[in-house]
Structures are given as structure tokens and as C-alpha cells.
Amino acid sequence: MSILIDERTTFIVQGITGREAVNLTRECLDYGKGAQIVGGVTPGRRGREVHGVPVFDTVEQVVAHHGSPIDGSVVTVPPAFTRDAVFEAIEAGIKLIVIVTERIPRGDVAQMVELATLRGARIIGPNCLGIIVPDVIKMGGIGGPARNAAQAYTPGPIGVISRSGGMTTEMSSTLSAAGLGQSTAVSIGGDAIIGSTYAELMPLFAADPQTEGIVIYSEPGGRMEAQLAEWVVANGDPLPIVAFMAGRFMDEMPGMSFGHAGTIVEGKEDTTAEKIARLQAAGIAVAERIEDIPEMLRELLSQRQRSALAAAGSSTEGSA
Amino acid sequence: MRFFEYEAREIVRRAGIPVTDFGFAKTPAEAREIAQRIGGPVVIKSQVLSGGRMKAGGVRFADSPEEAEAHAQAILALEIGGHMPRGVLVDPKAEVEQEYYAGVVWDGTRKLPVMIFSPVGGIDIEQVAAEQPEQVGRRHISTILPLSDFAAKETIARAGVSGGELTKIVPILRRLAELFLRYDMTLAEINPLGRLPDGSFVALDAHMEIENEARGRQRELLLELGVDPTETRQAREATPFEIAGEEVDSSDHRGVAGNVTEFDGNLGLVIGAGGGSLTLFDAVRAHGGRPANYCEIGGNPSVRKAAGLAKLVLSKPGVERIAVMMSIVSNTRVDIVARGVIKACLELGYDPAEKIAFFRIPGAWEEEGFKILQKYGIDYADRSVSLNEAARRAVEKIQGANEEAVR
């Protein structure tokens, strides 16, 4: 199993004739079992094809062509047109929207998220690389060309959530090398406002029978980590989590932004020191180095196994 | 990007919120003229972006135009928090019966703007929220429904304010929220909002910040306020090294070699991408290394651009060697970055094997990249060497070299 997408997922690419979108389409078609990209949209380019995918002027036309609801859309249009493209996808009934575009003002992002919430749709991103289910499907540029993605990602029990697209692959590759495959890896984006935060994806991973543990990549800025800590405490810590926190040097440089638009230390809550303290207080393990993550996860997984066995043992005794 | 107070007040005025009859002066003579026009006691306020103006002596009161001129002269020469003032704001000294707070900010968790109001103004709202939480009203607002008065009314009522005050403040708070959304602000604050003896309200100070990503579409506003398109107003001004970094990035549209930030170490960094750079910079420091710079390469830069960045870093005074490191790349080509950094070394007359302390970029086109690195005898690693270990090796090499030199 996986979260968000699986081999049956159908999606479109908005802005499909752009240079990056053409590459991304190729990558997704080639990867795993081959993505079902049922159409692409670039206004004024109806009738063309991109790697065999038919191009239309509007999302409505793709939906009509496909003849049944489409699950998702990868949005790769320039920042000035992204809100319109996302509104169009949502109003056409699409429920999962991956926004690759960066540098979108947060007022626009808030509008997209608000409409998505009203319509029961989910947004991943913006400024993200998308979602990958190892050896099955990828939706977005995550992992790069199929050959490269196959080298880094392997199927297994770990869910990965990362504010950095590149680090999603780096961390998954480290897990893979240690024999810990991934159930689903999600690049959630590095902006100040994003469609899906750690805490908002956790219920999906917690409900997924394949997922046994979670790895997150985290950065300064915002209170997404605090929200995760609150979720873990409120929901009885259903999955072991190991977090890695980058950008520790930024604690000494308030007001400066590095890496992603959302990374800025404005108050005490934004610092990595504060975030690490909050995560740890909620029982989330924080790794000093990425190479330590597999061992820490293994330890946490076996601890849970032992306590599950002990619980099963004591209940057997009770019934005997 | 943060606005100066005189700009923020102008934005408030445009939104239809009452402001005082203030003026902005760049010279003592201009300050005198404004004080004359106002014709009564005035306040002279330094226009700097750092806080603590009052404590630093950047706010002074004057009873006559002559005194206003003298104070303006002193304040214009006064550095506050490392910044010289842009000018002074000359404000009529208002007789205020009560000070209030009105603000709008983003709530990243709820992903909506939130209106904040308090009848306790003139001090930090964080302090009021901590000490007198019942005096602070908050309410989230929609970004897709038309902004309606009732939202402002609820916010004010939640702070315990009623009567004529409530009805008079409603349009002010609603307009503040409107300008926040219309102008892509990340912060819009009126603090204090003053109640005058006649019962009317006036904005006595304002604090506004606009989102950098929206500067393009807010060009008209910025132009009218006289904001130079190249002004960044970062926590500190860009250094010549950082400006040269921006030039390298904009010299070629392919890929990114951006966010070049100066530090004072001896190990030059050619690192990427966003998250990888943060991780690597931390790792270099954790191993006792002293980075000479921060940067982010990615998006498949050309050989020329990678070379341009490497040359800039190599030429920085104090840089002994560079480390070329990235998290696994899928879009950027390893061989292109390798060619770029080698080209930079050769063009500056250095031996790449000597100058490049360590190279760790695995991913797309790595076989080709590694072949080139081998040819030049450069120490490199594939993905089996972690980012942390790569940083350690780079630091070890530069420190080892220094120890040898001492011997």
C-alpha cells in the first residue's frame, strides 16, 4: 500500500509543453509501472502531443476526452498563472494537486488551499517535487529520470516527508542503502504556506498498513514541526518518527532566509533549537546526522515490536 | 521586504484609514518647513528599519520649527542598530486619550490571514498577548470570500471593546485587512492607533512588510512609494562579494547559482541545492570547518555559470580551498558542475586536485562526472559517502594542510 497515489492513479500535467514539464512527463511515464498521464494542458496548444500524451487547451477538455474523473494534476505553470491553473483543476473535480511552481506569493497559495478545502481536494506543494511510491509510480520530478529514481528509492515500510525536494531523495537513498525501503515519499515544499504539512499527512501514513515508521526532513521557519509534535501527542504516537533538522546555523542569523522561501528565523519558535526541543518533547527522535537515521529507526521499530509482543503475551496469559 | 514608517503610513493613508498630517524630510531644512506647516509641537522620528529608536535617541519632541530643525539635524547624523536613517518623519504631537493595536498577519498553520486587535496599544502585541490575553481579539479571515465588516466587528468585540469605539474601529480594521491582501503584505500593523479627544481615531505609527515574491506584481505601489527595485532591505546590506554572486547568477538564465552569502572562513563552498546547502553548511561547521560563503547551485547550471561561481569563491580573500558538494542530484548534471569547477581552477592558474578539497555530487551523469574528476586527480566520492562525511573530509583536508604549513 501507499498514500495519496498508487498504480491506478490517473493524472494530468498543466503547463505540459514547458521544458521542465516535458522532462517530468517522460520521467513519470518511464518510472515504475508507468504513470497514467491521461492528458496535458497548455492553453492554445490543443492537438499536440508530449511523449504520446495528448495536449488540450483546458482541463475540462481533458476530462471530457478521458470520459471519467481524473485523480490528480501536476501544475508546472509560471507563478503568475498558478492560481488560475489550480482553480481550474479543482473546479474540474480533480482531488490531488501537486504544485511544482516556486515563488508564488502566499496570498495566492492561501486562496488555492482555501478553495481546495471547500471542494475536498488536497494540495501538495507549492515549490515541491511531488510524490513517489517506489517501483510503482511517481507524480512529479521527484527522484529525476526513471533510472535515477530507481537507484535511490526502494519499496518498504518507511514513509518520508520532506520540506526539501532534493533531500527527499538523499534521505530515501540513505534508507535504501541500509535496507529500509519506502512506502511513499512526499516532497511537501519549502514555502511559508503549503498545501499539506507533516501533521496533515500523518493520518494517511498512520492508516497505511505498509508504513511502520516515518522520516522527516525539517528546516527553520514556521511552526510546522510544533504542529507535528502536537499531532503526535494528541494521537497517541501511532508511528515512530525520526526527524533530521537542517539549517542549525540559521539560529544565529535572525531575519536572513536561506534555502527555501519558508526558512526564516523571526521569533523563538522558528529556531532549530526550539523545534528540536518540541519534537523531542513529543517523543520524536532527532538525528544529528542523516547516516544515523536507519539505525535509529531500526531501534525504534524493534522497540515497538517488543512492546507489541509483550502486550500480546500478557493478553494471552490473561485469557488462559 | 520591510517598509520604512513613512512608507507604511502612506500605505495606510491610501487605504482610507485616517493618519496624522505627517511629512517626510531628508534634510533639517525640510523638517523645519514641515514643522512650520504643522504649526505646533511636533515629534521628529528617525526613519531606520531597526527597532529601539526611542531608546537610541531617534525620537525627539520639538515645540518650534527651529527646534525641529535642530533635532532633525542630530537624528539624521545618528546611527541606529548599524543603520544611518533614510530621513526623518515630522509628525504633529497628537493629544491621545487611548492607544489601541490593530494588525493583520499570516497564520501558516491555518493558512489564512488573522486579524488581531487590542485596546492595549503602543507596546508589543506579543507582550499584551502574554500578560493580558483577554484584551487581545483574533479572527481568521477568508482569502476568497469578499471581506466583510462583521469579521472586523467580531475581532474587536472579542477584545472586549463595545460602544462607539467598536463601530468607529470596524472600518479601520477592515481596511487594514483589505490592504494586507491587496498589496501582498506579510505584516500590516497600526500600533498605536490613537483615540483623539473628539472621539475620532488616527493611525499614529504603522509597520508593514511586503512579500518578496510579490514585488513584481506590486511594482506600481513600490514605484509610487519611491522604492528602488534593487533594494533588498535584508537584515544586512549585500556585500560586494554577494552582489558579484548575483551577477554570476543573472549572467546566464540556465540553472541557479544563487543566494551567495559571505562568511569569513577559509573553506569556499560550492554547494546545493536548497536543503542540501543547509545540511552541508551545518556539517562543515560541526566538524570545525570555517566556511567562506554559503550558496545554492541547482537547476542544471551551465559549465560557464558553475565556473563563474567557483571562480568568485576561489578569488575571495582568505579562501584556501573549495569543497564542491550537493545532495543527490536528478536535474543538475554532475559532469557539468565538475567541468565548471575544474575550468575555474585552471583559468585561475590553480591545480584542480590541489584547490578542490573534496567533490561529492552523486546523481545524474555521475559516471561522466567521476571520469573527469579522476582525470584531474580530484578527491571525490559517490552517494555511499554521506553529506556529513564529505564535509568532514573537506574540513580535514584544509586543516591538515594548515598543520603541515605550520610544521
Image: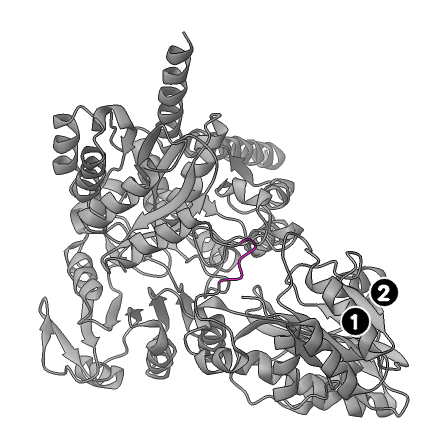
Q: Quadrant of the C terminus of chain A?
A: top right
In the depicted view, which residue is nearer to us: B227 or A184?
B227
- Secondary structure at badge 2 equals loop
The residue labelled by disc 1 is B136
**Other-residue count near label 2 (Cα within 10 Å), few / some / many at <14 / 14–19 / ≥20:** few
Mark 1 belongs to which subunit? B
Q: Main secondary structure of the magenta part?
A: loop
- The residue positioned 54% from the left and 37% from the top of the image is A285
- The residue positioned 73% from the left and 66% from the top of the image is B73
The residue labelled by disc 2 is B132
Hey, which residue is sitting farthest top in the picture?
B407
Residue B139: give x, y in percent of width and height: 68, 76
Asked whether the residues under the numbered discs 2 and 1 touch, taking CB atoms below 8 Å apart as contact, a structural biologist would say yes
- The residue positioned 84% from the left and 88% from the top of the image is B165
Q: Amino acid at mark 1?
A: Val
* Residue B304 is a magenta residue: no
User: Against B134, is A260 above or below?
Assistant: above
In the depicted view, which residue is nearer to us: A258 or B67?
B67
